[in-house]
Amino acid sequence: MNVNQLIIYDLIKWFGGPVFSTLLRVKCEGAENIPETGGGIIVGNHRQPVLDPMIVMFKIERPVTWGGNKDTFNVPFFRVFARIFGVVPLEMKGGKKAGDALDALVEAAKEGEIVGLFPEGDRAVLGLAKATRVMNFHTGFARVALRARVPVIPSAIIVHEEIHLPNIPPFITRKFWDHPVFNETGHPVTVYNRVTFRVGRPIDLGEFYDEPITAPMLNKISGKVRRVVNKLYEGEDMDRFMTGETPFDIVNDRV
């Protein structure tokens, strides 16, 4: 983020955060697990494209540089806020643009920023009926963490109550988002009520740093981090994954 983006970010956070947290009844556990300095990649489950990043933004002290689906920039309302907050547009289909976006996130993390990613992508947003399931993660976050040599910070957004509103109709969504599900049924809309945001202990990937980055390595890291997020979501093994009373070694320990 540049200086102007940081100023706007802080102003919105200071004035909007208390109101937002009160309206949605958001409680945070484990915020002390965010490192006070240095880079990191915060990842977690994802079902609501607006509320999820706002919960993270308002509940941790440090600013977050987000990577977000490039199609979000097609929607005028979201495009304005994405640019204000310095969101890096991610090309989900791969190619050079996808690589350039990951390069930008790597540089941000190397420069000591907290980078935010939702590795489920848009699959969970499309499947709102699967509310309690943490879907498989894309591996981009692991690649960014390894290249930047920063820890992965797992988190979980647990929604205790929610309201499902009518879908945004297809004739509107197809103007901005080229997706077969949205074009057929429209974009699902849900509003949270009573939320727990749980932040886990940073996961050190140091044992992987000097090895070549391979698909099996990325899949191993991604799978284990997803299971840690699921544990945080379910409130299991908190001594290992949130309080740190029991050490966790991502290379050798089972999740």
Image: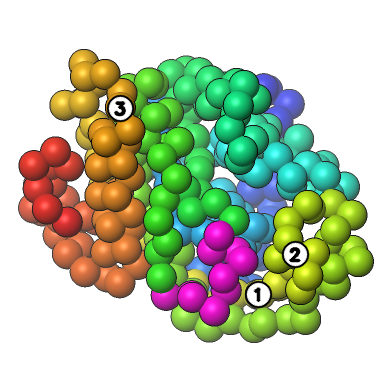
In depth, the one of 220 and 88 nearer the eye is 220
Which residue is labeled 1 in the image?
A: 191
Asked if labels 3 and 2 touch by Cβ distance under 8 angstroms, the answer is no
Q: Which part of the image, by quadrant, shows the N terminus? A: top right
The stretch in magenta equals 123-132
* 227, above or below 141, in the image: below
Q: Secondary structure at mark 2?
A: helix
Residue under the point 21% across and 26% down:
208
The answer to whether residue 61 is above or below residue 209 is: below
**Visible residue check, residue 36:** no
- The answer to which of marks 2 and 3 sits earlier in the sequence is 2
Residue 51 image position (x, y, % from top left): 62, 61
Circle 2: residue type:
Phe
State which quarter of the image contains the C terminus.
bottom left
- Residue 150: x and y in percent read 34, 27
Q: Quadrant of residue 143?
A: top left
Question: Mark 1: which amino acid?
Answer: Val
Determine whether the residue tagged by mark 1 lies in a helix, strand or loop: strand
Q: Could you tell me which residue is drawn at 73 percent across and 61 percent down?
A: 180
Q: Nearer the viewer, residue 20 or 216?
A: 216
Q: Which residue is mark 3?
A: 214
Q: CA distance from mark 2 to mark 3?
A: 34 Å
* Alpha carbons under labels 2 and 1: distance apart: 18 Å
Q: Residue 41's x, y, as percent?
A: 41, 37
Residue under label 2: 182
- Residue lying at 89% horizontally and 54% vertically, measured from the top left: 175
Three-letter code, disc 3: Thr
At which x and y percent is residue 139? 41, 40
